[in-house]
Image (tube, rainbow, N blue to C red):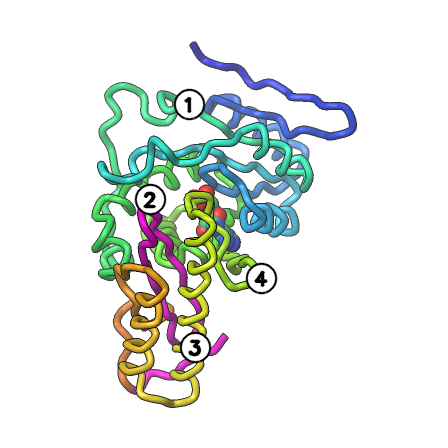
């Protein structure tokens, strides 16, 4: 059964309108546009934290109307990944979104996004084949790009806000939008972190108390390596020693690499620190964390 658009109301709190179908989303956005408003979208998989909320605030600063999408996209998870146990917390998400005053939440069911017979995906090159996330999650970006392309076509927003936390994803989306002439401004937002440097992530809830304590070593060691690169020390050694320290904290590293921040190609020996990004993925128990930082940040 198709759910219609409905309005959740709570006393003292203006809940965003929740839209469950593409036609309801399009209708609402048409109304906003008829009234002269510009529109931003913030795509998410829910389980919202302060990092997501910062994206919504940025969207609000850019456009008069903001829609947040919440959809745990099955096609971006590999067969052995955490799709089934990915945290889902719609009520709390709506309350968090209400607190920053987004106008609507697009929360489609799976059949709305992938109806029976769905058969099209976006094929990617360039940054999607950089040998980082794609090496460990071979079908991930195809799933991400397909769902983002759909969301951009469904909402036809002026702007779409994505976090630098998923740095390769941001590069993949910029490339897709450029190559397919999708008329939208892609806005990148800085990564929000806990006080000890751990990047906020919906997956941090998987960490037990002890793992959470050690998880901060990932970012701390990356900061240390970046500082050494900035100071002109031997780059290979800086990265190697940071990797050793990350492993010492209990991580198994998928990658820790210095890359060209624009193309994500491997860093060239003479490249200025300002052109470089340090990117990592590492597993603590069953939890896989990613992070990245500017080398001259
Ligand atoms: P997700 O729900 O994990 O797919 O993330 C939705 C959006 O939030 C993506 O654009 C992410 O890059 C962004 N995001 C996730 N974590 C953070 C963070 N700690 N700071 C800023 N943005 C983030």
- Element under disc 2: helix
The answer to whether residue 216 is left or right of residue 91 is left
| Labelled pair 2, 3 in contact (Cβ < 8 Å) | no
Instruction: Answer above or below: position of 223 versus 80.
Output: below
Instruction: Answer above or below: position of 100 versus 11.
Output: below
Instruction: Answer above or below: position of 245 versus 68.
Output: below
Mark 3 nearby-residue class (10 Å; few <14, some 14–19, many ≥20)? some
- What residue sits right under mark 1 in the picture? 109
Some atom of ligand 1 lies within 8 Å of the CB belonging to the residue at label 1: no
Identify the magenta region.
270-297
Q: Is the magenta region chiefly helix, strand or loop?
A: strand
Give the mark nearer the N terminus: 2 vs 3: 2
Instruction: Answer above or below: position of 7 versus 106.
Output: above
Q: Nearer the viewer, residue 62 or 195?
A: 195
Q: Position of residue 165 (x, y in %)?
A: 45, 56
Q: Residue furthest right?
A: 12
Give the mark nearer the N terminus: 2 vs 1: 1
Q: Nearer the viewer, residue 135 or 256?
A: 256
Residue at image x 65%, y 39%? 37
Residue at image x 48%, y 59%? 198
Give the image quarter of residue 262.
bottom left
- Element under disc 3: helix
Give the image quarter of residue 234.
bottom left
Q: Is residue 126 at all visible to an observer of this figure?
A: yes
Give the mark nearer the N terminus: 1 vs 4: 1
Q: Position of residue 71 (x, y in %)?
A: 43, 33
Q: Residues under labels 3 and 1: Cα distance?
A: 43 Å
- What residue sits right under mark 4 in the picture? 195
């Amino acid at each position: 059964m198709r759910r219609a658009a409905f309005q959740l109301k709570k006393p003292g709190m203006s809940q965003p309108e929740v839209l469950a179908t593409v036609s309801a989303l399009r209708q609402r956005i048409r109304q906003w546009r008829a009234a002269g408003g510009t529109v931003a979208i913030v795509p998410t998989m829910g389980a919202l934290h302060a990092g997501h909320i910062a994206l919504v605030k940025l969207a609000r600063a850019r456009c008069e109307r903001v829609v947040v999408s919440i959809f745990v996209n099955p096609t971006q998870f590999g067969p052995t990944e955490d799709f089934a146990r990915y945290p889902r917390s719609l009520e709390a998400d709506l309350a968090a979104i209400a607190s920053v005053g987004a106008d609507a939440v697009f929360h489609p069911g799976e059949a709305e996004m992938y109806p029976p017979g769905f058969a099209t995906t976006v094929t990617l090159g360039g940054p999607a084949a950089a040998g980082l996330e794609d090496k460990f999650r071979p079908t991930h970006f195809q799933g991400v790009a397909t769902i983002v392309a759909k969301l951009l076509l469904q909402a036809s927003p002026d702007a779409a806000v994505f976090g630098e936390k998923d740095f390769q994803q941001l590069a993949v989306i910029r490339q897709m939008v450029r190559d397919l002439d999708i008329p939208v401004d892609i806005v990148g937002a800085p990564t929000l972190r806990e006080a000890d440097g751990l990047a906020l992530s919906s997956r941090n809830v998987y960490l037990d108390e002890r793992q959470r304590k050690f998880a901060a070593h990932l970012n701390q060691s990356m900061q240390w390596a970046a500082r050494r690169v900035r100071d002109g020390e031997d780059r290979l050694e800086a990265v190697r020693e940071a990797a050793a320290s990350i492993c010492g904290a209990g991580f198994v590293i998928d990658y820790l690499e210095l890359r060209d921040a624009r193309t994500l190609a491997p860093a060239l020996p003479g490249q200025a620190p300002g052109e470089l990004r340090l990117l990592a993925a590492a597993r603590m128990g069953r939890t896989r964390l990613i992070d990245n930082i500017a080398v001259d940040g």
